[in-house]
């Protein structure tokens, strides 16, 4: 085994172990922290495979932003410290789904690549940029439009009142002006 | 640095030098803060330890070492104890990739700008772990404030840095300095302002120190920490200032560029001088401004900094197309 092989094996084991702990952890907050380790490990895997840009973006976006949002939500809802209780049937079913996905993904990867070793030639940042903004520019723009749509929709859902009617007086940033006119909700 | 050394020796030497810089530069900045703040407020600052008080931080360090390391009974033990390390180490990793001059760089990775930003973005996890792990409601509120603040300010920070990378046509910090010329001071000025404001917010320093507001939530995530672990958090804050000041100097002020060229250590001295000026600016902001409220802070990020950063990005893109 060469140096990169050993490194990849080590990082991969850390990632897999952290992933397993994230799933089996009884406290949701600990699970989120193990997720940090798993995502960081995944970034390490990308790095060993030569995809430097993907690794750094993985770290910046997932560890630096997505997991921070997850942790923030857990703190906000105070569910972080509550132990998760699941039945044996539930655990069995989730293990089955996990194993099924692994077999499906691994099988299709092995079927397409045939198990032959491929030399590590990670794309440079320039290659990735040409890919995204040249060859795949339309799917990329469509995806960003989709995300924007989801964002706007989320804001709309979050701002609508429970009853379904959107009255100006119920909007969080406007009640003082409405209250001055003696309007009672 | 001579390049004919054996690789292993070179790596070890560079690691030692980076570690030494990591341990001394934050202390120097801390000492500067004592004195600059003191004189700006019409007082002397610490004067007792050593000549003119220059050993004050050493005395503080000795005090921290002697204090008992307490873990509260309600704390989430492993999370609480690990948090200072998680807050501190990312800045050490980031410092290794920041060039002091074309040759003086710990690890010259190709996409070093992204590397530094990615590494520093991990530090927030430490603050969140501290906020959660302390088992204290003030810490929890502080942790939540920190999480909300850092996610909001991450975006303008990255966008303003992206503007410079776009102008230079590279993600490498050494490449950015090589492409830099003096009129970028004007061209990239809005990005520089956004980056400065966002980095102060990322470091959770006044005026953006709502997460650790001592008068409201008694130091937020740091409430329960004592002794060395508290000192590590302080070190993380000052190391973060050093990293951000160096990054600002390299991105917006041309790093080691200056009269007399990059001869020997002159370039590195230019970088240090510019970074020191930026550091003094950080200190000045702390003395000059009151703390902004939580909602003002979010408004400022999303309604002022973000549009400004996007506008700058558009201006930079137009400039790059016109110039090429």
Image (tube, coloured by chain):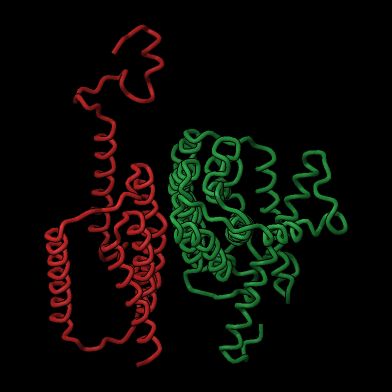
Chain colours: A red, B green
Instruction: Say whether residue B101 is left or right of residue A12.
Output: right
Where residue B39 appears, as percent x and y from the top left, is: 80, 44
Horizontal side, residue B180 vs residue B54: left or right: left
**Residue B252 visible within the image:** no
From this view, report whether residue B154 is shown above or below residue B307. Answer: below
Picture residue at 48% right of the left edge, 57% below the top: B80
A104 on left or right of B272: left
The structure residue drawn at horizontal position 35% and vertical position 54%, both measured from the top left corner, is: A29
- The answer to whether one can see residue A149 in this image is yes
Q: Is residue B298 above or below residue B320?
A: above
Residue B287 screen position, x and y as percent: 69, 40
Where is residue A14 shown, x and y percent of the image?
35, 74
Q: Residue at x 19, y 86 (%)?
A: A115
Q: Quadrant of residue B106?
A: bottom right
- Residue B219 image-quadrant placement: top right
Residue B140 at x, y = what percent? 45, 44
Q: Nearer the viewer, residue B53 or B221?
A: B221
């Amino acid at each position: 085994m060469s140096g990169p092989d050993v490194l990849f094996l080590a990082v991969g084991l850390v990632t897999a172990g952290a992933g397993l702990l994230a799933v089996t952890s009884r406290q949701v907050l600990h699970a989120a922290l193990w997720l940090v380790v798993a995502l960081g490990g995944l970034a390490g895997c990308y790095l060993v495979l030569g995809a430097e840009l993907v690794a750094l973006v993985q770290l910046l976006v997932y560890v630096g932003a997505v997991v921070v949002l997850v942790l923030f939500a857990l703190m906000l809802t105070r569910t972080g410290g509550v132990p998760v209780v699941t039945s044996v049937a539930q655990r069995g079913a989730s293990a089955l789904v996990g194993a099924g996905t692994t077999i499906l993904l691994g099988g299709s990867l092995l079927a397409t690549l045939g198990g032959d070793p491929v030399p590590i030639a990670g794309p440079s940042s320039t290659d990735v940029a040409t890919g995204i903004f040249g060859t795949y520019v339309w799917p990329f723009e469509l995806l960003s439009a989709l995300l924007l749509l989801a964002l706007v929709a989320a804001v709309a859902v979050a701002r609508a009142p429970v009853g379904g009617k959107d009255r100006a007086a119920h909007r969080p940033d406007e009640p003082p002006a409405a209250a001055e006119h003696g309007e009672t909700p | 640095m001579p390049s004919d050394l054996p690789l292993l020796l070179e790596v070890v030497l560079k690691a030692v030098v980076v570690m030494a810089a990591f341990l001394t530069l934050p202390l120097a900045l801390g000492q500067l803060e004592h004195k600059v703040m003191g004189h700006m407020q019409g007082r002397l600052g610490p004067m007792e330890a050593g000549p003119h008080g220059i050993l004050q931080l050493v005395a503080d360090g000795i005090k921290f070492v002697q204090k008992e390391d307490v873990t509260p009974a309600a704390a989430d033990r492993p999370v609480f104890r690990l948090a200072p390390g998680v807050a501190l180490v990312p800045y050490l990793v980031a410092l290794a990739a920041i060039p002091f001059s074309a040759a003086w760089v710990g690890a010259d990775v190709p996409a070093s700008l992204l590397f530094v930003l990615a590494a520093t973005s991990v530090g927030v996890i430490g603050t969140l772990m501290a906020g959660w792990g302390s088992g204290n409601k003030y810490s929890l509120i502080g942790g939540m404030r920190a999480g909300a603040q850092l996610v909001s300010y991450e975006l303008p920070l990255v966008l303003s840095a992206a503007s410079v990378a776009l102008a230079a046509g590279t993600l490498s910090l050494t490449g950015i300095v090589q492409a830099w010329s003096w009129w970028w001071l004007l061209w990239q000025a809005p990005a520089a302002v956004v980056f400065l404001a966002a980095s102060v917010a990322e470091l959770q320093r006044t005026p953006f120190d709502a997460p650790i507001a001592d008068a409201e939530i008694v130091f937020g995530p740091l409430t329960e920490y004592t002794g060395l672990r508290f000192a590590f958090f302080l070190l993380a804050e000052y190391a973060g200032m050093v990293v951000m000041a160096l990054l600002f100097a390299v991105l917006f002020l041309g790093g080691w560029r200056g009269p007399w060229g990059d001869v020997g250590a002159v370039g590195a001295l230019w970088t240090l001088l510019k970074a020191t000026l930026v550091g003094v600016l950080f200190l000045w902001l702390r003395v000059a401004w009151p703390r902004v409220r939580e909602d003002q802070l979010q408004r400022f990020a999303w309604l002022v900094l973000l549009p400004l950063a996007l506008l700058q990005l558009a201006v930079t893109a137009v400039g790059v197309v016109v110039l090429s």
